[in-house]
Image: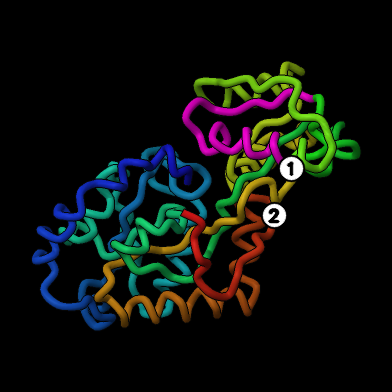
Amino acid sequence: MSLTRRAALAAPFILAAGAAAAQSGPLTLAQIRANGKLRIGCEATYPPFTFRESGNIVGYDVELATAICRSIGVTPEFIDTQWSGVIPALYAGRFDIIMSSMSYTRARMERVAFTIPYAEAGQSLLIRARDANTIRAIGDMGGKSLGVKLGSPGETLHPRLAERMRAAGGQPFSAVRTYDDHPAAYLALMQGSVDGVLNTLPTLAYVMRSQPNRFAIVRGIGADNWAGIALRREDTEVLAWLNERLRAMRADGSLKALQEKWFGIEFNLPDTIPEPAA
């Protein structure tokens, strides 16, 4: 999920510290089993990770959490939460973990523990399907127009991309057009007003899957990043269990199957937590 969209995660540290007393001691698997459920904080407005369908929270994260919880005989309970307060709510004991495509940043890693990655979160480029043979890398966008969402990581990234293109001896973008939301940018792409749109890979993969044969994706446009499951730093037993289940699902192919179901692609996931760029 974009840093700009969730910039409010930089809420004062005192909020989380002051609420920490709500959870007395580390959470254990025995406690989760006794409760019969794993409470999961999310923002249910981010398809296909967590979103509402017929009043229920559904998505990739929901199916993944269900599979993880099955290993200890409990069920997941997703709790829709305003993203700006999700970490303080975790430490206040409103839920046990955060699972809603939370990407790794230094600021977040100072406040919560993270599992190994379960989703990609780096920037990619959405193009028209008919242009897939001519636009294979960002350098191929020289002299072409780019669409970005106002306030998004793509808006921050595009000047660096243009500089990279110049340094490689190519042309920069002919124009960069800004839109109030990504759907407006996608529409402009279909209509030919722009030649590419920047957004995170999972989101673009979902767009491409939802509208077959219209779009293609150019991966690896910006710095690589991934998303993990977040939890309180003291909950080490739960962290070890989550990591074990994610590794097991990678090994048996079930994680790949969920990715292909919801995104139409397989994520490239490292085996360890990456060092965030910022």
| Residue type, label 2 | Ile
Task: Provide the secondary structure element on which disc 2 rests.
Answer: loop
Q: Which mark is residue 217?
A: 1
- Closer to us: mark 1 or mark 2? 1
Vertical arrangement, residue 222 with respect to residue 270, above or below: above
Q: Position of residue 75 (x, y in %)?
A: 35, 67
Quick check: 90 left or right of 119?
left
Instruction: Determine if the magenta segment contains residue 130.
Output: no
Q: Which residue is mark 2?
A: 265
Q: Which portion, as a residue range, is magenta?
A: 144-164
Give x and y (percent) for residue 156: 54, 35
Looking at the image, do the residues carrying marks 1 and 2 touch, with CB atoms under 8 Å apart? yes
Residue lying at 51% horizontally and 54% vertically, measured from the top left: 60
Task: State the residue at coordinates (27%, 54%).
Answer: 87
- Residue occupying image coordinates x 70% and y 34%: 162
* Residue 46 screen position, x and y as percent: 46, 42
